[in-house]
Image (cartoon, helix red, strand yellow):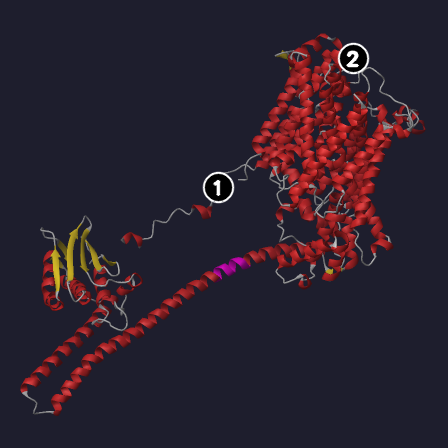
């Protein structure tokens, strides 16, 4: 295949990736993110599968069988704990705006710039071999694709003719475009995540395509490949654990542990899993989809490896190139090209995310703290530093790739892909004690973390990194075989005479042992300082604090203006202004100038800066513009105490104010009731006195006239006397009713119960009031059952009720065609008496009121005659017998007063 | 019509008191158990039990068991982790 074609297709593919990323950014800018999705999140985690997986696994399988697997089984086990461990990491990072592992560790141990710098150094040194691995794989693939099969792949020429160098530079350019075009305080790259997810699909599809081609195109299925392999003695052992000399279970376990740690602590994994996480809930799906992805991509590794060995014969072809050489050898150049694109996907995805993550670490935790310390930059009064930060990151990206290229030349040729990758794995595993310990152990200190990291990293360099250089011929071979200065105990791969382990397990054992040991012992040496304790509390108890009730460990004085200027320097002016306006809104003040410059604001600004320049630098910068008091350990505990007390206190206050509110409501209601009762009493008094005065006035007037005029004709005197008697009767009736009401209410009324025939009682009542209805020109209809309805009650009182209802009806029937109906019905419980009229009816809002004392139907202007006590008394009587009284009325269609009396009545 | 005035029988106060608390095992503990199971199954000596000279449908038992156990773990994690927030 011509080099031009391969290069052209590769660049076209990278351009496609860039289009996907741009689309992702474009969608994100419009608030319709395509990465806010658990599937995309899980796919982006598959950036774990690099060229190592793509080419290296097959090579590993071809040389040692199932040994390619533990690197993928470990992540599966780790993801089982994702919901516990990763979620906590995500929550901590989000609360503190942590964007890298260096930030995480530095921030946890008292925002230590030293520690963050050390972590960054370890990362850079540790990750370089891994980058080299990608370059080696892609350049190897390219050579395989462009060289006729069987010819030597090694080319000799001047250094500027090396395609790998150009590939490294092209990747650096793409990485800059992806991740360092502009500065974003949140350090999230939605477009990049979209591109990575897309790449994950491409590499899976391409690898499965090759797998299917080999298994079903070149052989008759998986069973056929295994059966044929069994027939070859050198291949038969590959599918068994117990190959020559037994199975190294120690190494198996070490690889499981190593990959378990790496899947979390590799910079690119931290980037996609923690920093780019949109929603913690997405972890639930990613916990099984990501392992499933690993399962799928490994499914055909063994068949491809065995198939390649069967077809080419052992030692003829590099097994790491089987995915390309098998299709090429069988006339499938397009499939080979697809496989190459898949491998390119795997390599570029890794390089882009890894270098972006490491470059921001280098910038935030190595270069910026040094720059800020220097007088020139740190105290330059104003001036936007965002361009400077971007510049540093771009340079860092290029530098990292060139370092990778250099390692590729120094040591890469001698090693298999997998071995190179494992060196990097062992380096990042050194972060595990400081990270995990920091998340769960409050007693860990900065010195402890520092000592652990230094010990672990030192031993890693000595037992793994230096030997890798020695094996490539850059150090004398005696260093390995004799030990430095001929001291056998210091042999790097058999330290202190520890033999019997492979070099990786050996290195991992010593480095992790020293790391954990130093971390724990030094931490226990002294109690944590104030800064360490405050950060420990924020990290370890992250799930116990909500955003609002977070304790803020800061004391001192600050000015809003200074902080705003500072933010503008690192975030850009418009972004800083927007942040301050949002903060003002959130705290409920009118604008940014009125913000209270308290500890919370200082923490807010520091957290925002952390997103852009890292924990350590943010701490330094904030400290430079505010006057702060140094906190002692007691202060930290006091602040924590205050916060929790404040929280308890505010909960208590809330409770109290709730109960107060409740009491106030009740009091108000009671007061309203009292007021209304008072008004009613007044109304009653005026109404009663009014009613009393009318008859009194006429009695007095008539009596005076009779007294003054002795010659009054007897006829007229007789008429006057008649009126006086009638008015007196009316008076006494009124007084009687008032007394009656009072008696019933106070329970002093006399009840003379007897068996009452209700039908008869109703008939009598109607009879009694017939005159009244006749005067009003109204007709009365009485409908009672034919059988007697007997009830035990006071007949006089019931008659009183009936007379009251009937006279009410008489008062309200229209002047023409008035009609009143009295109906008696019985049911199982008792009897119901209803008196209906065709008067104006009672408005809905008055229906409840008319049974209250002193209220009368009709409005103030034309109140009908009466005391307003009739209905209340009637109701009292009915209720005395255990019944109830009510009204149904549709205004304009008459009213229906009814009462129900139970058969087994009351008293 | 009288019924309107009679308050409906007080409904059991379910919404306020929450559902009767059935003892729920925190999902974290289940996931830790799956993790422990995985570590045991994928290491010596349990894994060595599968290393036998036999084939199932032409595929040697050892790789088959590795992929099978792996799939089992993935299934368990999916079953336990990927459910709606209770």
Q: Quadrant of residue A349?
A: top right
Question: How many C-alpha atoms fall within 10 Å of the one at disc 1: few (<14), some, or many (≥20)?
Answer: few
Residue that mark 2 sits on: A314
Nearest to the eye among marks 2 and 1: give it.
2
Note whether A137 is above or below B83 in the view shown.
above
Note whether A327 is above or below A754 in the view shown.
above
Give me the chain letter of mark 1.
B
Classify mark 1: helix, strand or loop.
loop
| Numbered range of the magenta stretch | A653-660
- Position of the C terminus of chain A by quadrant: bottom left
Quick check: is A656 in the magenta stretch? yes
Residue at (66%, 13%) from the top-left corner?
A: B52
Quick check: is A179 in the magenta stretch? no
Question: How many C-alpha atoms fall within 10 Å of the one at disc 2: few (<14), some, or many (≥20)?
Answer: some
Residue A420 appears in the picture as rendered: yes
Q: Nearer the viewer, residue A127 or A642?
A: A127
Residue at (80%, 43%) from the top-left corner?
A: A393
Q: Quadrant of residue A144?
A: top right
Classified by dominant secondary structure, the portion drawn in magenta counts as: helix
Residue furthest to the top? A231
Residue A272 appears in the picture as rendered: no
Disc assigned to residue A284? none
Question: Residue A471: percent from the left, percent from the top?
Answer: 88, 25
Q: Nearer the viewer, residue A588 or B28?
A: A588
Classify mark 2: helix, strand or loop.
loop
Q: Is residue A510 left or right of residue A844?
A: right
Residue that mark 1 sits on: B21
- Position of the N terminus of chain A by quadrant: top right
Residue at (67%, 32%) from the top-left corner?
A: A198
């Amino acid at each position: 295949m011509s080099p031009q074609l391969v290069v052209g297709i590769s660049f076209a593919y990278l351009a496609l990736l860039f289009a996907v990323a741009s689309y992702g950014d474009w969608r994100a800018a419009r608030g319709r993110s395509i990465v806010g999705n658990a599937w995309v999140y899980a796919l982006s985690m598959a950036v774990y599968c690099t060229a190592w997986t793509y080419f290296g696994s097959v090579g590993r399988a071809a040389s040692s069988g199932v040994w390619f697997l533990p690197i993928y089984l470990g992540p599966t086990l780790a993801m089982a704990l994702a919901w516990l461990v990763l979620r906590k990491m995500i929550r901590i990072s989000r609360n503190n705006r942590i964007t890298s592992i260096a930030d995480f560790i530095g921030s946890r141990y008292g925002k230590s710039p030293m520690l963050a710098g050390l972590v960054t150094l370890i990362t850079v040194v540790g990750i370089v071999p891994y980058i080299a691995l990608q370059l080696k794989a892609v350049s190897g693939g390219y050579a395989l694709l462009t060289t006729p099969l069987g010819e030597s792949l090694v080319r000799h020429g001047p250094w500027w003719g090396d395609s790998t160098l150009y590939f490294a530079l092209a990747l650096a350019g793409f990485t800059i475009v992806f991740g360092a075009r502009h500065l974003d305080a949140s350090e999230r790259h939605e477009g990049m995540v979209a591109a990575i997810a897309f790449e994950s699909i491409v590499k899976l599809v391409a690898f499965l395509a090759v797998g299917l081609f080999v298994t079903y195109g070149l052989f008759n299925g998986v069973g056929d490949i295994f059966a044929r392999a069994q027939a070859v003695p050198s291949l038969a052992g590959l599918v068994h654990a117990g190959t020559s000399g037994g199975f190294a279970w120690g190494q198996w376990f070490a690889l499981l542990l190593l990959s378990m740690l790496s899947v979390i602590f590799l910079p690119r994994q931290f980037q996609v899993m923690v920093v780019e996480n949109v929603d913690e809930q997405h972890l639930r799906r990613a916990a099984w989809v990501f392992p499933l992805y690993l399962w799928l991509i490994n499914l055909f590794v063994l068949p491809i490896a065995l198939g390649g060995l069967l077809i080419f014969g052992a030692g003829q072809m590099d097994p790491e190139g089987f995915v390309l050489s098998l299709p090429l050898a069988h006339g499938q150049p397009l499939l080979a090209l697809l496989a190459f694109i898949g491998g390119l996907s795997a390599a570029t995805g890794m390089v882009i995310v890894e270098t972006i993550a490491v470059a921001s670490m280098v910038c935030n935790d190595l270069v910026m703290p040094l720059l800020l310390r220097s007088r020139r930059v740190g105290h330059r009064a104003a001036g936007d530093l965002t361009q400077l930060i971007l510049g540093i990151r771009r340079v860092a990206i290029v530098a990292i790739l060139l370092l990778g290229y250099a390692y590729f030349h120094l040591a890469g040729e001698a090693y298999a892909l997998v071995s190179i990758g494992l060196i990097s794995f062992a380096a990042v595993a050194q972060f595990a004690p400081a990270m995990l310990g920091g998340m769960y152990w409050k007693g860990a200190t900065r010195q402890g973390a520092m000592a652990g990291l230094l010990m672990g990293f030192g031993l890693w360099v000595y037992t793994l990194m230096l030997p890798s250089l020695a094996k490539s011929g850059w150090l004398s071979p005696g260093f390995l075989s004799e030990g430095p200065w001929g001291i056998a105990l210091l042999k790097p791969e058999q330290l202190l005479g520890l033999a019997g382990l492979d070099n990786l397990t050996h290195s991992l054992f010593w480095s992790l042992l020293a790391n954990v040991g130093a971390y724990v012992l030094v931490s226990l040496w002294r109690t944590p300082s104030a800064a360490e304790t405050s950060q420990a509390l924020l990290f370890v108890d992250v799930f116990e604090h909500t955003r609002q009730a977070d304790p803020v460990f800061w004391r001192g004085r600050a000015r809003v203006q200074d902080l705003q200027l500072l933010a503008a320097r690192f975030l850009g002016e418009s972004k800083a202004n927007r942040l301050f306006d949002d903060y003002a809104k959130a705290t409920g003040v009118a604008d940014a100038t009125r913000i209270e410059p308290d500890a919370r604001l200082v923490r807010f600004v520091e957290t925002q800066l952390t997103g852009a320049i890292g924990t350590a630098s943010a701490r330094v910068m904030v400290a430079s513009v505010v006057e702060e008091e140094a906190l002692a350990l007691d202060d930290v505990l006091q602040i924590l105490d205050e916060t929790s007390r404040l929280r308890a206190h505010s909960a208590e206050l809330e409770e109290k104010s709730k109960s107060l509110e409740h009491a106030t409501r009740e009091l108000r209601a009671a007061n309203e009731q009292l007021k209304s009762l008072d008004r009613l009493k007044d109304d009653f008094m005026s109404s009663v006195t009014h009613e009393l005065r009318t008859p009194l006035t006429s009695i007095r007037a008539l009596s005076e006239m009779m007294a003054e005029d002795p010659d009054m004709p007897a006829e007229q005197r007789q008429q006057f006397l008649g009126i006086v008697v009638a008015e007196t009767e009316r008076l006494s009736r009124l007084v009687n009713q008032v007394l009656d009401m009072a008696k019933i209410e106070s329970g002093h009324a006399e009840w003379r119960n007897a068996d009452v025939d209700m039908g008869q009682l109703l008939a009598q009542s109607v009879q009694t009031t017939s005159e009244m209805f006749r005067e009003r020109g109204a007709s009365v209809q009485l409908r009672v059952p034919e059988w007697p309805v007997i009830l035990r009650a006071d007949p006089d009182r019931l008659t009183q009720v009936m007379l009251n209802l009937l006279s009410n009806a008489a008062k309200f029937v229209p002047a023409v065609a008035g009609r009143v109906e009295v109906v008696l019905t019985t049911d199982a419980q008792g009897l119901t008496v209803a008196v209906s009229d065709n008067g104006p009816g009672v408005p809905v809002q008055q229906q409840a009121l008319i049974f209250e004392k002193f209220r009368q139907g009709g409005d103030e202007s034309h109140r009908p005659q009466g005391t307003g006590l009739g209905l209340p008394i009637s109701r009292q009587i009915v209720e005395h017998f255990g019944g109830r009284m009510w009204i149904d009325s549709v205004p304009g269609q008459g009213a229906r007063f009814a009462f129900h009396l139970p058969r087994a009545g009351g008293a | 019509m009288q019924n309107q005035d009679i308050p409906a029988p007080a409904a059991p106060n379910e919404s306020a008191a929450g559902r009767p608390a059935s003892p729920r095992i925190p999902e974290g503990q289940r996931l830790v158990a799956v993790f422990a199971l995985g570590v045991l199954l994928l290491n010596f000596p349990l894994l060595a039990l599968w290393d036998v000279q036999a084939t199932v449908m032409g595929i040697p038992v050892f790789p088959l068991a590795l992929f099978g156990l792996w799939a089992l773990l993935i299934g368990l994690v999916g079953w336990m982790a990927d459910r709606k927030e209770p």
